[in-house]
Amino acid sequence: MDENTAVQELKTPTGKQPDEPKIAQALIDENDLHTCNGKTYNLDGEVSDLELERAVADALVRMGFTTRVAARAKAIVALSKMLSTEESIPLNRQAIPVQNGTVIIEKDGSATFSPERRLAPYRLNCSYNPSAKDLAHFLKWLSDLLTPKDQVTFQEIMGYLLLPSTQGQMAFFLLGTGGEGKSIWGTILYALFGNAFVPTKVYELEENRFTIATIENRLIAYDDDMDHSKLKKTDNFKTIVTAKTPIMGERKGADKFMFLPYARICACGNFALSSLHDTSDGFFRRLLPIRVKNRPEGRRNISDLEQYILPELDAIFMWSLEGLKRLIENDYKFSISEKSKELLADLVEESNSMATFLSKEVIFEEGAKVTTKALESAYKYYCSRTGDVFRGGPHGLVGYLKAREETFHIKYSKRVSGDNRGFVGVKLKNCGIDLDSILGKGGDKK
């Protein structure tokens, strides 16, 4: 933080009490401070309390104070935050704050630059520089990591991360067995996005009530080594990716607050994100996984490759703007490779034994009927043969089919066979069990 000349000019005789309100206001004016939900921002983005306290303490020492400096600095900063509190920080969703000004993204995806540094909750660690084109190390890393078609997707992802928008409604995952260099992505993101980046753990967004607050006013929530455990809940994950309504944030020792998130979830890992109970289309359609190339045998990795890439940040930013333009032109639909589509289909199949059971052991046919008891018994028997996870209860097969009646052209009935509940429009193949003993011989009741 720059030396606060306005604060320094507040001369106070040694032994007198400092004029705390006057110093607090000078701190606000000199640094253009704005506080929202307990966090303070200036033209460079978020400013920590410690940084502010250090500046005030330095000023107090220069004024001649030698006792209770830390306590006084803390009190003055608390007062400055109170005096500068606002309901929200100005946010232009078409603007990208960079070091040398502001980039405005037009409706057609083109970029317009202004040298004005406008107030924003963050500022990227790069400059708008159309002449910056040296991407040699970055593109070498990218070509070693991804196929050409996945590189197209990756460019759109990097562009999508630049704006505080969730129109793409996707979370992004680089998957590999290890040693391919995928974690360098996190180093690049942190270096490029600065205080718009926050490290996190995906599972903590669901299980730790304080983690949600950390993504406020961030562009990226990044998990460098995603846990292979299945999510017990997916409510927060789906809300963050879509971000249509405000969510509740909470910090230790402070009141809860509401905010609209726009952080995009990015992660690297050996395993894909999966859910213990949620097998809905709404969960899987929010995932954009990319399988990285296997590391070729004998390839020598450069241990500090990121140090060669980081000087290319301005050029990486310009390259990402190209991806953003293409994404906007395509109405925020990503250019997903067939390989990634197949990977997602495999993830759905692996995560959802119900979907594979239905594809292999069930026939959807007009006029056909089956009881819920027969379906669940056949499904349980199928899982015992294949080793797949049996999903029972409210998140089980019956609930899965009820939620997809229109998709499968079926109808749930309380009396599909006698007094038995079941579905019309579906029947079982021969699953190796005595279906007659389950279905019974009774006639249908209308």
Image (cartoon, grey):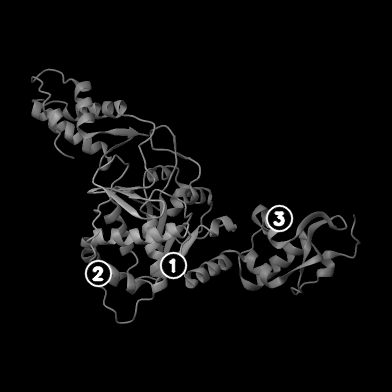
Say whether disc 1 or disc 3 marks the residue closer to the N-terminus.
1
Are discs 2 and 1 less than 8 Å apart at CB? no
Between 388 and 354, the residue placed more toward the observer is: 354
Which image quadrant is residue 325 in? bottom left
Q: Amino acid at mark 3?
A: Lys
**Residue visible at 13% across and 31% down in the picture:** 5
Instruction: Give the x, y percent position of residue 446.
Output: 90, 54
The residue identified by callout 3 is 402
Q: Which mark is residue 290?
A: 1
Instruction: Give the x, y percent position of residue 103.
Output: 30, 50
The residue identified by callout 2 is 137
Q: Amino acid at mark 2?
A: His
Are discs 1 and 3 less than 8 Å apart at CB? no
Above or below for 428 versus 3? below
Are discs 3 and 2 less than 8 Å apart at CB? no
Seen as rendered, the residue at the extreme top is 16
- The answer to whether residue 157 of the structure is visible from this angle is no
Instruction: Give the x, y percent position of residue 67.
Output: 13, 25
Say whether disc 2 or disc 1 marks the residue closer to the N-terminus.
2
**Residue visible at 22% across and 61% down in the picture:** 131
Between 198 and 112, the residue placed more toward the observer is: 112
Of labels 3 and 2, the one closer to you: 2
